[in-house]
Amino acid sequence: MSFVDELDAWPRERVAALYDNVTETEVLSAIGREERTLRDLAALLSPAARPHLERMAREAQRLTRWHFGRTIGLYAPIYFSNLCAADCLYCGFAVCSGVKDERVTLTDDQIEAECTALKNMGYDSVLLLTGEAPKVVPPAHIARAVAISRRHFSSVSVEVYSMDEADYTLLCESGLEGVTLYQETYDRELYSEVHPRGLKRDYAYRVDTLERAGKAGVRKLTLGALLGLFDWRLDLIWTAMHARYLQKHCWRSSVAVSFPRLRHTPPRFRVDFPMSDAELVQAILAMRLFLPEAGFNLSTRECGDFRDRVMSLGITSMSAGSSTRPGGYVTKGEEVLEQFEVEDTRSPEEVVAMIRRAGYDPVWKDFDRAFHG
């Protein structure tokens, strides 16, 4: 049995029914509970909860400080390839996106240079990213990039295409700590529509990816839905279910949730389910009450003012000074294709200063290499 079987038992109609006739009493009961059900989560995500966001925020802040203290982890993405054979309609990397900017895969020396640049900024945690091109950038190439990065940083994670368990074992042997992978949307019908070609089209294989990574020994598993691609209230229920499933079945790994909001898309794609700032705040608060022990990440997809305001409401990790194009920290070539436009363009120093002004401690590294054995 895999999480796909649980999803099959929770089609969109059953999930939507969780929101039927939610009352204010149910919202207040959900806020007051110690352990919350899916119906409680739906109540917290529903329009009925909007008048009670301050109360939710106090509880979310209490839970976050209880489990994580007053700390914010810092990481940076390293894009080392923007080649992609998939055709995700919403993505600038897609093979048929119509974007003509240069596509490149960094050499080992160029990856080394990117690592050196980020290390000089103070980073000790990085996320390596590629497009969906396993024939051009195979697992062995990613493993080599992990090994290069591991010489510079205590924590190396990847956000790449879905792989087999043996491939994740290879990456772990090269020093990998974490895997980030977004299902994009958990709705099967829409998933097929927005992924018309490429290996990514295999819905079930992608759903089971993080469990394969956990079984291979990956210590940190990060999931999420691309908010705005589908009805966010439904996708967040499925995301929360997936997180709890991974906490149970991959108990040796920590589980984190990211909140990527779909904003800049190719001209051919229209965002049919836009998510407002207020709705994203509500989503973060509700998910924190449902998943008190999960790390929460918020990237530079969001603008600086918004990140400043929501940081204390459940966020535990943030990127800063990010580039979403290969070679972005050294060459900064504007002609190289980027995945999406960064909203928070502040330097790491500026983000660190903001974190400290808010009374939190910026954490570049929160464990020792000895924990890797």
Image (spheres, rainbow, N blue to C red):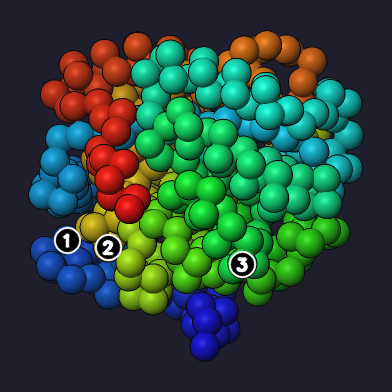
Compare marks 3 and 1 and give the one earlier in the sequence. 1
Near-viewer residue (357 or 14): 357
Q: Is residue 239 left or right of residue 148?
A: left
Please give the name of the residue rendered at 85% of the width and 59% of the height, measured from the top-left corner.
Answer: 197
Name the residue carrying label 1. 31
Q: Please give the residue where the numbered disc 2 appears in the rendered image.
A: 290
* Amino acid at dot 2: Phe
- Residue shown at 47%/75% (left/top)? 15
* Left or right placement of residue 164 versus residue 58 in this view: right
Can residue 190 be seen here? The reply is no
Q: Residues within 10 Å of mark 3 (few under 14, many from 20)?
A: some
- Number of the label disc, if any, that sits on residue 173: none
Under tag 1, what secondary structure? helix
Amino acid type, label 3: Ala
Where is residue 91 shown, x and y percent of the image? 72, 41
Q: Nearer the viewer, residue 100 or 13?
A: 100
The amino acid at mark 1 is Ile
Q: CA distance from mark 3 to mark 1?
A: 42 Å
Q: Earlier in the sequence, mark 3 or mark 2?
A: 3
